[in-house]
Amino acid sequence: MSSKQNIMPVAGILSGALVWGLIWYPYRVLQIAGISAPLATLISYLLAMLFGAFMLPGVFRELRGGWAALLVFSAGWANFGYVLAMLHGEVMRVLLLFYLAPLWTLLLSYWLLGERLNRYGYLVIALSLGGAFVMLWKPELGMPFPQNSSEWLGLSAGVGFALSNVVSRRANHLSVEAKSFSIWLGTALLTAPLLCWQGGVSLQGIAAVYWLILLLLGIALCAVSFAVQYGITHMPANRAMLLFLFELVIAAIASYFLANEAMGLREWLGAVLIVSASLLSGKLYAVK
């Protein structure tokens, strides 16, 4: 394999980690400007769909049937829930709860794909639950559950991410283009009802500079979806998971400098356990 063929999948995964480690910040800027999270999410994902419109005819032919529908909505919730959680919660706590996804992947793979746990699977479960317990436990509050709606959203978005990954493996008849499009479509479909419930869509008063931010978000979402799908398709799962964890580094640096957030000792200990579980999750399909 040429050096270019080796570099491109790595670049695809790292670009996704970079974008998703930073994407919460422009959404926060838009929210401060009076553009709600659901509206900003809907506009940016519709723009991503527009930029990917060249593949629309073939994609709509593919996205039929129960597995395709489940992929659309699980991928949509993973993205929409992630944005909502990161806007209102502590960035790193939300992200670490999101990265419990390997635990849910194990359970969903057993249920939907009939995949049995190997020795790494039990270790992933122990590390994931241990990390969540250390990070969330407060003696005065009893059981170590997420402490607010943002943390619950981050946790549920991780479940959606795990489900979308499992369904993506199950729906192997779908192309990379269809799987990328399912992310944008699902996010837009889930965002629209919330906007209607909140009073509908109003584009009045959005200044040109914020339209530019939304435009750039749409371009980034479109490009990174293809880049990540390309990387996943051309790289072993354990190596891809290792590179995805670069998102935690980016988010930690960004949250410190852009949001004045810093993690305590308990959060760091929980992070080490959860990251270890994520690293080991790559072994689930590399070892028989």
Image (cartoon, helix red, strand yellow):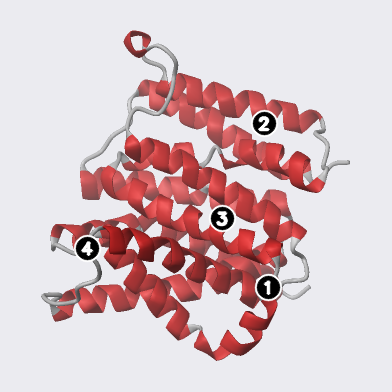
On the image, the x and y values in percent for residue 220 come to 41, 73
Q: Residue at x 40, y 27 (%)?
A: 267
Q: In the figure, 8 relative to 81: above or below?
A: below
The residue singled out by tag 4 in the image is 199
On the image, the x and y values in percent for residue 63 come to 65, 74
Front: mark 1 or 2: 1
On the image, the x and y values in percent for residue 286 come to 81, 46
On residue 64, which mark appears? Answer: 1
- Quadrant in which the C terminus is drawn: top right
Among the two numbered marks 4 and 3 on one chain, the one whose residue lies closer to the N terminus: 3
What's the distance in space between the residues labelled 2 and 4, CA to CA? 43 Å
Amino acid tagged 3: Ser
Among the two numbered marks 1 and 2 on one chain, the one whose residue lies closer to the N terminus: 1
Badge 3 vs badge 1, beta-carbon distance below 8 Å: no
What's the distance in space between the residues labelled 1 and 2, CA to CA? 34 Å
Say what secondary structure mark 2 lies in.
helix
* Left or right relative to 288: residue 183: left
